[in-house]
Image (tube, grey):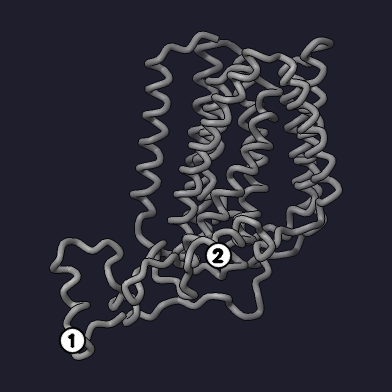
Amino acid sequence: MVVSLWVWAAVIGSILVMLAVDLIALRRAHVISVREAALWSAVWVAFGVAFGVIIWSAYGAEFGQQYFAGYLIEKSLAVDNVFVWAIIFSYFAVPREYQHRVLFLGVLGALVFRGIFIALGALLIANFTWVLYLFAAFLLVTGYRMIRQRNEQLDPEKSRALVLFRKWFPMTDTFYGQRFLVRRAGVIVATPLLAVLVLVEVTDIIFAVDSIPAIFAVTSEPFLVFTANAFAILGLRAMYFLLADLIHRFIYLRTGLALVLIWVGIKMMLKVDLFYIPTTISLAVVATIIGVSIALSLRATRGQGRQAPPAPATAPFRVASDEELAAVEPVWRRGVAAAAPAETGPGSGADD
């Protein structure tokens, strides 16, 4: 598959435009409704499918099927990512109107991290074919662990990333709107929202480590690996607001995702020296596993409505009042004049 530089540039430029549109459309802090999330989810899926049709038309059925197989795998794994985000937001009791900014940066970070991992993976495979065996073994082990741990839930309190963050950065116990940093008593401190963003980015890296080897099992074309990942990730923010309150209903999805990883791990191991499983079969198997796991989940939990993920009995952080927000010092002081109020003494009325 020969893809010219201008095509790469056009695709990356289009993705950046889509991100800008997404940011502008949801720039105001507000609670995203299910209807709005469903609409945006449909838009992003339509973009992903339309791009696959373009690939199919321009490069042939084989590459088109490889793209759709990769897109389906990444979209399915993204659902598990969404559920982890929901647990993090619930643990920190992040107000829903503040969540979309964290998610936007999380999606942006996911694109960057996956781009890096894709480049490294393609470079390794091009120079060391035996790396495919390592990827395959990793997928098999990961799938097995997912099955064993299918009923376990993430505990953010035990996250090493959170422990290190609290150790290295002073953090306030208050949400100050959508701010990640605030200045208190002249000292810049992190807000809980920054800790949430750090955990979201860490989960992005962890899921990238799982998903990149998985997609290389169905296509070795870096362009298809990148675009399938990108279009699957673009709709993550809308997908979160659509599915966050339905975690309890997808009881068999994690098992289905584990079986997908095991399947693509076997496929990757076989194709190195033994036997190449046609993409059509791979796509059908992945679609069947995901479809059956979702159908069985919804059937087993029919009648259950939407409900928020479990949250701590007492919120660990509070939301700043309007008066506290108005009194927040600017994080970045500009010039000597900005520092002058701090030197006027107790009678100046300055609020630290």
The percent coordinates of residue 308 (x first, y second) are 63, 67
The percent coordinates of residue 178 (x first, y second) are 40, 64
Q: Residue at x 19, y 91 (%)?
A: 347
Q: Residue at x 32, y 82 (%)?
A: 323
Query: In this rendering, would 341 be left or right of 66?
Result: left
Asked if the residues shown at circle 2 and circle 1 are in contact, with their CB atoms under 8 angstroms apart, the answer is no
**174 versus 265 height, above or below:** below
Disc 1 marks which amino acid? Ser
The percent coordinates of residue 13 (x first, y second) are 37, 29
Q: Distance from label 2 to label 1 (Cα)? A: 33 Å
Label 2 environment density (alpha carbons within 10 Å; few <14, some 14–19, many ≥20): few
Q: Which residue is identified by label 1?
A: 348
Element type where label 2 sits in the image: helix
Element type where label 1 sits in the image: helix
Label 1 environment density (alpha carbons within 10 Å; few <14, some 14–19, many ≥20): few
Screen quadrant of the N terminus: top right
Query: In this rendering, would 122 be left or right of 149?
Result: left
The circle on residue 166 is 2
- Which of the pair 62/7 is nearer the observer? 7
Q: Residue at x 77, y 32 (%)?
A: 138
Disc 2 marks which amino acid? Arg
- Which of the pair 12/285 is nearer the observer? 12
